[in-house]
Structure formats: structure tokens, C-alpha cells
Amino acid sequence: MDVIEAIEIGREYVERIYGDDVTHIAVEEVEPPQGNTWSITFGFFHPWNRKPKSRQESLADAFFVMDSKHPGWSTRTFKTVRIHDETGEVKGMKHRAIPGVGHET
């Protein structure tokens, strides 16, 4: 499979697992197949990890750019999805800790 197919499979998996409990899903890292397995890291927000915002802060979030200086960055969750290259089967998903960035659990 190509990288786009692998990303689509991984994103669909994250969406199936978390449903409406996550927002702003984005591809953060893609590692080409090692052996027969792609590793694709997705970042997203859980609503319970974000503090309520003022109207002005919400407007600023509408123009949010992924920048480690943005206050929302520290609440981002990262998960790596492993996908079999030949079958497209999801082999697993694990938390991707990035020191100093993102939600730790």
C-alpha cells in the first residue's frame, strides 16, 4: 500500500476507537514499513483535557497553528497506529509520549 492508504486506514481506526471523544485529528509522523508494518502517529484533543475557554480564546483557536508555544499544545494526545503493509490490518495502537509536549496518558 502507499502512504496515503496507510494514513486513511490509521485515521479511520482512531475515529472508530474514540468516536466523537476526540477533535482535531492530524497526522504527526509517518514511518515507512519496517518489515511489513507502517507506524503512523496521530495527534488529537480529548475534550476533557481542555479547559473551558473564553470567547476570545475560542476565536484564537479557530486560527490555531500547531506550535509548541500555543497553550493547547500541552493537552494534545498522540497515538501510534501500526498497520500491516500487505493486508491493511491494524496490528495495534499505543500511546506516543513526546517529552514536554502533549498529554502524558
Image: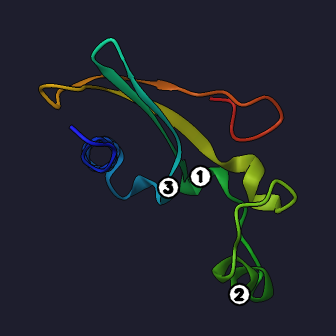
Question: Split into 4 quadrants, where in the image is the N terminus?
Answer: top left
Q: Nearer the viewer, mark 3 or mark 2?
A: 3
Q: Residue at x 50, y 55 (%)?
A: 26
Q: Which residue is mark 3?
A: 26
Q: Earlier in the sequence, mark 2 or mark 1?
A: 1
Residue 62 vs 67, above or below: the answer is below
- Hey, what amino acid is under mark 1? Trp
Return the x and y of residue 86 as percentages of the image width and height. 15, 25
Element carrying mark 1: helix
- Hey, what amino acid is under mark 2? Leu
Q: Earlier in the sequence, mark 3 or mark 2?
A: 3
Q: What mark, if any, has residue 48 been given in the picture?
A: 1
- Hey, what amino acid is under mark 3? Ala
Between 96 and 5, the one lying in front of the other is 5
Q: Which image quadrant for residue 56?
A: bottom right
Element carrying mark 3: strand
Q: Earlier in the sequence, mark 3 or mark 1?
A: 3
